[in-house]
Image (cartoon, rainbow, N blue to C red):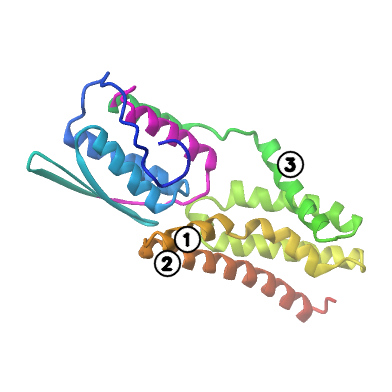
Amino acid sequence: MTGSGDKQTDMPPGPLVVNAPQMRELLTFLREICQRLVECGCSSNRVELLAQTLGASWGFEVESVAIPTGVWISIRKDGQNLVDLTRVRNWSIDLNRLANINVLVESIYEHRISIDEATRRLAEESRSPPPYSMLLTLIAGGGTCPALIYVYGGKPIEVALAFPVGILVQYLQKYVFVGENRVYLGDCLSAAAVALCACFAHQVFPSLDVPLFIVGGIVALVPGLVLVNAVHEVAQKNLVSGAAKLLEALMITASLGCGVVFVLGLWLILGGH
């Protein structure tokens, strides 16, 4: 169960130290944990595998289908069958929370904690604050842009000016355009802010390489992990989820491009250089 691979381990679950859950109780928990996994950016085939493995550890036959907007779960045992559909409306990439949920899944699989205890821990995890402070998050985001521009061969002035731009982008992405507000519009406006900063910086420093500055500012917004998950799921024959994530990556990239093009076009219309 450890790691991020998609193969089930051959190690059987640990000794039964807690009472087995009822079918309805297990279904409610699986619905909650699958929803959280999808929201954190977990691949669909991984979500389906974890649901199936957890059910099998308690003697239930579980089948699930996960896509970016919902999860279907079916539980069967002793001639009884329960089916549930859960909608997913929030999406993000939260690797820290994803790792914590994976540890929780291992504890359930090995029967070290009950479903009630796991439900309580899952609720606490959902309410837990970010692992890093706002200041440290902004500093880390601010260092991304100048580091990328330096790697691309940028001048010292471009590297220095990229730091406040990186802080601005990090602030917009982490604290302004979150949840439903981040759907494409947030990416477009973040890219537009980077382009606007590049235009103003070029007015003060004419030698500034505007294309390089813009690329260094928005490259952190490119949906790399979404694209990797999409290709991985297509390779696993999970075509519906893979195609949906490929389209999502395309739409995010198009939103970034639209934000940059809009600002540059408006700047030229207004007489900028």
Give the structural element (helix, strand or loop) at label 2.
helix
Position of 112 with respect to 161 (left or right) is left
Name which residue type carries label 1: Ala
Task: Indicate which disc residue 243 carries.
Answer: 2
Task: Indicate which disc residue 230 carries.
Answer: 1
Which residue is located at x 83 percent, y 76 percent?
272
Q: CA distance from mark 3 to mark 2?
A: 35 Å
Q: Quadrant of residue 109?
A: top left
User: Does the residue at mark 1 contact the one at mark 3 (Cβ under 8 Å)?
Assistant: no
Q: Earlier in the sequence, mark 3 or mark 2?
A: 3
User: Does the residue at mark 2 contact the one at mark 1 (Cβ under 8 Å)?
Assistant: yes
Which of labels 1 and 3 is toward the front? 1
Name which residue type carries label 3: Ile
| Highlighted magenta segment, given as a residue range | 85-114
* Dot 1 crowding, Cα within 10 Å, few <14, some 14–19, many 20+: many
Position of 88 with respect to 138 (left or right) is left
Q: Is residue 97 something that shows in the picture?
A: yes
Above or below residue 237? Residue 61 is: above
Q: Quadrant of the C terminus?
A: bottom right
* Dot 3 crowding, Cα within 10 Å, few <14, some 14–19, many 20+: some
User: Does the residue at mark 3 contact the one at mark 2 (Cβ under 8 Å)?
Assistant: no
Which residue is located at x 40 percent, y 36 percent?
1
Q: Quadrant of residue 65?
A: bottom left
Q: Which residue is mark 3?
A: 139
**Residue 108 is covered by the magenta coloring:** yes
Q: CA distance from mark 1 to mark 3?
A: 30 Å
x, y percent for residue 3: 48, 39
Position of 212 with respect to 69 (left or right) is right
Q: Earlier in the sequence, mark 2 or mark 1?
A: 1
